[in-house]
Image (cartoon, coloured by chain):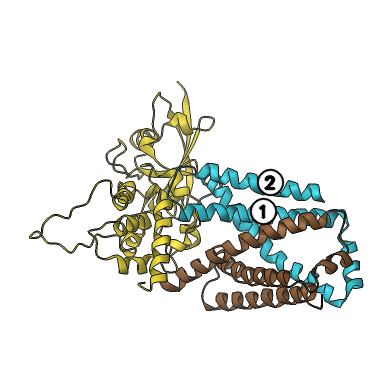
C-alpha cells in the first residue's frame, strides 16, 4: 500500500482508538456497577430494552471495534505470519464484516424492542 | 591471571561459535578481547574497527545478545560469570565472522530519501535558521547519527518486515523533513509512508535504548507519523 | 543474518509493546464470541438466563476477569502510544509504560472486587 493508504489506515486506527477509549471506560464502569449482586436476564434486559441512548452508544462502540480490530491485526499478520498482500486485506475486510454483523445483531437483541 | 571464556562467531550465515580463552585485564573492552584473539590466537578471525575510541561506529557487534560498540563496551560491564559471546551485528548479511555487509542498511537510507535536497546555489545568500527554532531543535536532536547500524540491529521490525526502512534511515528522513532549507519533503514523505515505512514502527524502542549516541529514532519516527497525517489530511501527500 | 533473542528484548518499552499486541490479539478473538453470546438474548430472556447461569461458574468468572484485565491493559498501552506519538517528546517513556501497567492492574482489581 502506498503512503496515502497507509497513513489513512493509521489515522482511522487512532481515531477509532480514541472513540473506543471513551466507550471502553463507560462500558467497564457500567459492567462493574451491573455485576454487583449477580446478573439476570430480566435485570439486564429490563434496563436496556428500548433504551435509545444505549442503542446509539453501543452501535458506535461496535462500529469502532469492527474498524479497529482488523487494522490492528493487519500489522500482526504481516509481521508474525508473513501474510501480506491483497488476500490479507480481503480476509480482514471479511473479519470486519463479521464483527459488525455479530455486534449489531447483539445490540439489536439487547437494546431493541419497545421500552 | 584471570581469564575470560569467549565464544566468537566464525563463518557466515552457516557457521558456529568458536571458543577462546583470553587473559582478563582491568579496563578491558570487548574490542581489546577480539583484537587479542586475532593477534595471538587465530589470525584468520575477520572483524572491523577503525577509531577504537567511540567516534566512528565501525566496531558495532552483538555482545551477549545485545548490539553494541565493542570499543565502548567494558568487559566488566557485560561479562556474565567470566563469559562473553561475540557475534556479528544482527539483521545484516554476514560476510565473514564478525564482518557484516552494511549495503542493505545504506540502501534503505537512500530509499527513505535520506539525502539533503537544497534549492540554493553558492551564488545565493545563506539560509538563516535560528538555533532555538523549534524545527531546528528537532533536527539537532537527531543529526548526530553516524550510521553505525546498532539501532537497525536492535529493532525486531527489521527482522519481521524485510522491507522496513529501519530506525536510522527514518531518523535521518525526519531531520531532513524538519530542515527548513530542504525542498524534497513531498517525495520524502511518500518514501517513508508506504508499506515498509514509519508506520511499521510499533515503539518497541530498542533503537532509543541502544543508540550509542543517545539519539531517539522513536521520536523522529513519531514526528514522521504526525507529518504524514497532516499531509494526508491536507491532501498534499 | 543474525536475529535477536530475549537478551535484546529486556527493556520496558518492549514489554509494553508485547502486552499491547498480545492483549489485542486475544481481544480480537474474544470479541466475536462475546457478540454471539449477547445475541443469545435474541432468543428470549429464558435462554439468556440459562446462559447467564453458566457465567456463575468460577472458571467463567476468572475468564471474565481476564478479559477485563486484557481490555484495561490494551487501553493503557494504547494511551501510552497516543501520548508517545502526539505529545512533544519527553524522557519519561519508561514511567509511562509503568503507569499504563498500573492503570490496567487497578481496573482489573476493581473488577475482581466487583465480582
Residue C10 in view in this figure? no
A8 sits to left or right of B144? right
Chain letter, disc 1 residue: C
C88 sits to left or right of A79? left
Choose between B203 and B133: the one closer to the eye.
B133
Say whether marks 1 and 2 touch (CB < 8 Å): yes
Q: Is residue B117 above or below residue A107?
A: above
Chain letter, disc 2 residue: C
SS of the residue under disc 1: helix
SS of the residue under disc 2: helix
> What's the residue at 22%, 59% (across, down)?
B181
Q: Which residue matches tag 1? A: C72
Q: Which is nearer the N-term, disc 1 or disc 2?
A: 1
The picture places residue A4, in percent across and down from the top left corner, at 42, 73
Chain (brown): A
Q: Which residue matches tag 2? A: C105
* Location of residue C27 (image quadrant): bottom right
- Name the image quarter holding the C terminus of chain B: bottom left
Q: Colour of chain B?
A: yellow
A94 sits to left or right of B221? right
* Residue occupying the far top of the picture: B1
Amino acid at each position: 500500500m502506498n503512503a496515502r493508504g497507509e497513513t489513512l489506515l493509521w489515522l482511522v486506527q487512532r481515531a477509532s482508538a480514541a472513540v473506543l477509549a471513551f466507550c471502553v471506560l463507560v462500558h467497564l464502569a457500567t459492567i462493574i456497577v451491573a455485576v454487583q449482586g449477580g446478573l439476570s436476564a430480566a435485570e439486564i434486559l429490563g434496563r436496556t430494552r428500548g433504551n435509545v441512548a444505549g442503542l446509539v452508544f453501543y452501535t458506535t462502540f461496535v462500529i469502532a471495534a469492527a474498524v479497529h480490530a482488523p487494522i490492528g491485526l493487519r500489522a500482526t499478520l504481516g509481521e508474525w505470519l508473513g501474510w501480506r498482500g491483497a488476500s490479507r486485506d480481503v480476509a480482514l475486510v471479511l473479519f470486519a464484516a463479521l464483527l459488525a454483523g455479530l455486534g449489531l445483531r447483539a445490540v439489536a437483541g439487547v437494546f431493541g424492542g419497545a421500552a | 591471571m584471570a581469564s575470560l571464556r569467549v565464544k566468537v562467531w566464525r563463518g557466515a550465515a552457516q557457521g558456529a561459535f568458536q571458543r577462546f580463552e583470553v587473559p582478563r585485564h582491568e579496563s578491558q573492552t570487548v574490542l581489546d578481547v577480539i583484537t587479542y584473539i586475532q593477534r595471538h590466537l587465530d589470525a584468520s578471525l575477520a572483524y572491523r574497527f577503525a577509531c577504537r575510541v567511540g567516534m566512528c561506529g565501525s566496531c558495532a557487534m552483538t555482545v551477549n545478545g545485545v548490539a553494541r560498540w565493542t570499543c565502548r563496551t567494558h568487559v566488566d560491564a557485560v561479562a556474565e560469570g567470566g563469559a562473553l559471546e561475540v557475534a556479528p551485528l544482527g539483521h545484516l548479511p554476514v560476510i565473514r565472522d564478525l564482518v557484516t555487509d552494511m549495503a542493505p542498511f545504506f540502501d534503505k537510507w537512500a530509499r527513505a530519501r535520506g539525502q539533503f535536497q537544497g534549492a540554493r546555489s553558492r551564488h545565493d545568500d545563506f539560509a538563516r535558521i535560528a538555533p532555538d527554532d523549534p524545527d531546528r531543535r528537532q533536527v539537532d536532536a537527531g543529526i548526530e547519527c553516524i550510521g553505525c547500524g546498532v539501532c537497525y540491529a536492535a529493532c525486531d521490525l527489521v527482522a519481521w518486515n524485510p522491507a522496513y526502512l529501519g530506525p536510522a534511515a527514518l531518523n535521518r528522513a525526519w531531520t531532513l523533513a524538519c530542515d527548513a532549507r530542504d525542498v524534497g519533503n513531498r517525495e520524502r514523505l511518500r518514501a517513508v509512508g508506504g508499506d515498509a515505512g514509519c508506520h511499521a514502527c510499533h515503539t518497541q524502542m530498542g533503537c532509543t535504548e541502544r543508540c550509542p549516541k543517545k539519539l531517539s529514532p522513536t521520536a523522529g519516527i513519531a514526528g514522521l507519523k504526525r507529518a504524514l497525517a497532516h499531509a494526508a489530511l491536507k491532501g498534499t501527500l | 543474518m543474525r536475529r535477536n533473542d530475549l537478551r535484546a528484548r529486556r527493556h520496558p518499552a518492549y514489554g509494553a509493546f508485547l502486552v499491547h499486541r498480545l492483549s489485542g490479539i486475544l481481544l480480537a478473538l474474544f470479541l466475536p464470541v462475546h457478540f454471539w453470546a449477547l445475541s443469545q438474548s435474541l432468543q428470549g430472556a429464558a435462554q439468556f438466563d440459562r446462559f447467564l447461569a453458566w457465567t456463575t461458574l468460577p472458571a467463567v468468572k476468572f475468564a471474565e476477569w481476564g478479559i477485563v484485565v486484557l481490555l484495561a491493559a490494551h487501553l493503557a498501552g494504547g494511551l501510552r502510544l497516543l501520548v508517545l506519538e502526539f505529545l512533544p517528546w519527553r524522557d519519561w517513556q519508561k514511567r509511562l509504560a509503568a503507569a499504563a501497567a498500573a492503570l490496567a492492574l487497578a481496573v482489573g482489581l476493581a473488577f475482581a472486587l466487583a465480582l
